[in-house]
Amino acid sequence: MARERGGLFSGDPGRLKIPYPPTPQGQRDFLAEILKTVRAAVKAAEKGRKAKKAKAAKPKGERKLGCLDAAVRVLQEAGKPMRCDEIVKVALAKGHWQTKGATPAATLYAAVIREVAAKGAKARFRRADMKETRDGKAVSLRGYFELTAAARQ
């Protein structure tokens, strides 16, 4: 008479009911049969699977620009601080960058902020400084980014 035991884990009694033999020899035979079935399943799965071919890395010159590299190029060409949505419009119009995303300006903004936070003074971008108008009033260029001296070269 075989005892009913819980699933594969003793802490999970409601999962799968497996007849478990009461004698040690019966238990060994039972586990050997399970092991044989699992090995056969693994072997069959390996036969059906195709090996993946390794892709060759593209040389640096052939790669498309990422959003940060495209932003650097746009800011270099413009020579003035720009907002992320303006940078994205120019980059997409000139073909420096391609995206299918719904909010590419938000993607660029997040990437710029991440780079500034991670690299600090070595980052390619920085927030644009305050600008004075003819009236002598200081105007904050909120949301505008410019290139650092190292990125301008």
Image (cartoon, rainbow, N blue to C red):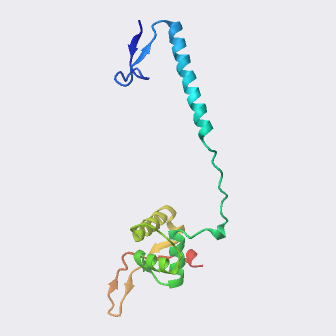
Seen in the image, is 13 located left or right of residue 66?
left
Q: Quadrant of residue 76?
A: bottom right
Q: Residue at x 39, y 16 (%)?
A: 5
The relative height of residue 10 versus residue 100 in the rendered view (above or below) is above
Figure quadrant of the N terminus? top left
The relative height of residue 5 versus residue 92 in the rendered view (above or below) is above
Q: Quadrant of residue 6?
A: top left
Residue 112 at what x, y percent from top left? 46, 68
Question: Does residue 115 appear anywhere in the picture?
Answer: yes
Residue 8 at what x, y percent from top left? 44, 23
**Viewer-proximal residue among 112 and 123:** 112
Q: Residue at x 66, y 70 (%)?
A: 61
Seen in the image, is 65 located left or right of residue 135?
right
**Viewer-proximal residue among 66 and 93:** 93
The relative height of residue 103 versus residue 131 in the rendered view (above or below) is above
The relative height of residue 86 versus residue 53 in the rendered view (above or below) is below
Q: Residue at x 48, y 77 (%)?
A: 92
Instruction: Residue lying at the far bottom in this picture: please name it.
Output: 134
Seen in the image, is 139 located left or right of residue 119?
left
Figure quadrant of the C terminus? bottom right
Seen in the image, is 94 located left or right of residue 1?
right
Residue 151 at what x, y percent from top left? 56, 75
Residue 11 at what x, y percent from top left? 38, 22
Q: Quadrant of residue 39?
A: top right
